[in-house]
Amino acid sequence: MVIDLPSDKGLAHFHAVSRILNLPEFVKQADFTQQVETNELPTEAFADVLDRKFPIHTKAAAYLSYAYFLSQQDGLDKQASLRCAQGFDRAREYWGLHEEFEQTKKAMVKKAEPNVSEFAMVVDTEAGQERFFPVNTPYEIIKSAEALVVNRHRFDYALRSQGAKNIVKAAAKAGLPFSALPETLHKMAGCGITTKEAAMLELTKRWDKEARPSLAEPLHACINALGNLESGLLGGEVCEKVAAIIDRYDRAAGKPSFPEDVLFAFTKQAAEKLANNIVTMIDGTSYWLPQLEKASEAFDVLGQDIVKGIKDVDGSLNLFKVAELIDTLPRMDAEILKEALTTFGIWPYTIDKNAMVKMVVETVQPPTLTTIHTKIEKRADILTRLEAEDPLVKRALDVVRRLKTAESKCDEDTDEGEESKTPRGIRGLFINKAPNKTETKPVS
């Protein structure tokens, strides 16, 4: 897909272009909205009049469109490239951009012979080396990231993980923002975290059904190793080892395997999404933004002047404007709004968005089991509320609850004096016997 400024979601290409070029003042001072709102423009306002790509309706738009065009020219077919060239000739003459276009072309067009380092993945075959996913330009990096996500089933975990890491490195070198790459690619690259409990559950689901010793033993050994670790978040190195074991097992069993979806489930994007939906008042009181939409009438207590600024024509809340309002609301008005929200059943959360991001992103491996349990207890209220809104939180809590239920059942069985019974649940996985023996499996 050809990307121009109006279709540049997340402004990935814009950030890449701005790092390469010294943007002129007329571009820096231009009204950005005017450059991207092009639906009402005639076809003549685009360099590519057929596909309505690369707007040239303003001097700034023409300059940026030319930079976008040059970065993707090699990926265009001849007819599209010719149409664009003719359109940019018109723009150059009309806006007087001869010098600017020449400088942009010198900066953007770099014809370098590709080598091994310019591909994300190199595979040794009998016929020689095969190279996949070029990463020579920002456009190629984004397209290669998308292609690897679509074709990840073709490569084992170790190979696609290395390819994903190379794409992430290339994106960082090219100045592309973190959000320019698909979240699945970040999971493949190991840019995420999970819990010990979630990892053990994935292993257990496979080991419990596997009767072949050669396949069951590696799973059992990994389960035992994880059992010696503290509960809570796992470090990236451990997650990668577990993911490799799951991938080898799945492929040997003839099953599709995407262990990164679990072992690196909580990514930076997920954390930012979670954090961006939490708004905090001046006194530190936080609210889950989507819930405020259910209490739009509560904001009427702030007066019609404020209400007009945060509600759309249909009377619904504009959540972006609500977030801005709450961040800057004076203390007295904040107290009035809190009381009004309470009458509508909207209660504050007990954590601000900065603390949430720090908890799930910066804390990779907790120092002690006590620390994790304390954090979970302190945040029980927010986790319970988030469970209804976020599938990932719900999944994590479901795992924890299952583990607690299984352990409680084991404790009950022991208290009743039934020590001869095979232990049930997760605890039954940690007896040190060969995994192919029936007595080592939990009783179904």
Image (cartoon, rainbow, N blue to C red):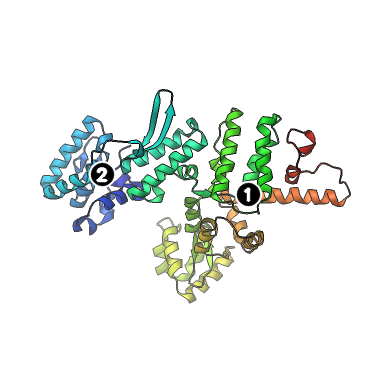
Residue 360 shown left or right of residue 374 in the figure: left
Looking at the rendered structure, the secondary structure element under dot 1 is: helix
Q: Is residue 200 visible?
A: yes
Q: Picture quarter containing residue 185?
A: top left
CA–CA distance between discs 2 and 1?
45 Å
Q: Residue at x 58, y 64 (%)?
A: 347
Q: Which residue is drawn at 59% across and 60% down?
A: 382
- Residue lying furthest right in this view? 417
Q: Residue at x 55, y 44 (%)?
A: 240
In the image, residue 72 sits, relative to residue 309, either above or below, namely above
Amino acid type at circle 2 is Tyr
Residue 345 shown left or right of residue 102 in the figure: right
Residue 191 shown left or right of residue 60 in the figure: right
Residue 198 shown left or right of residue 272 in the figure: right
Neighbor class of circle 2 (other Cα within 10 Å; few <14, some 14-19, many 20+) is many
Neighbor class of circle 1 (other Cα within 10 Å; few <14, some 14-19, many 20+) is many
Q: Nearer the viewer, residue 124 or 28?
A: 124
In the image, residue 272 sits, relative to residue 86, either above or below, namely below
Sequence order check, earlier mark of 2 and 1: 2
Instruction: State the image coordinates of residue 343 (x, y, percent, origin top left).
Output: 58, 66
Q: Nearer the viewer, mark 2 or mark 1?
A: 1
Badge 2 vs badge 1, beta-carbon distance below 8 Å? no
Q: Residue at label 1?
A: 196
Q: Which of 395 and 363 is in front in this view?
A: 363
Labelled disc at residue 68? 2
Instruction: State the image coordinates of residue 372 (x, y, percent, origin top left).
Output: 63, 59
Instruction: State the image coordinates of residue 402 (x, y, percent, origin top left).
Output: 70, 48
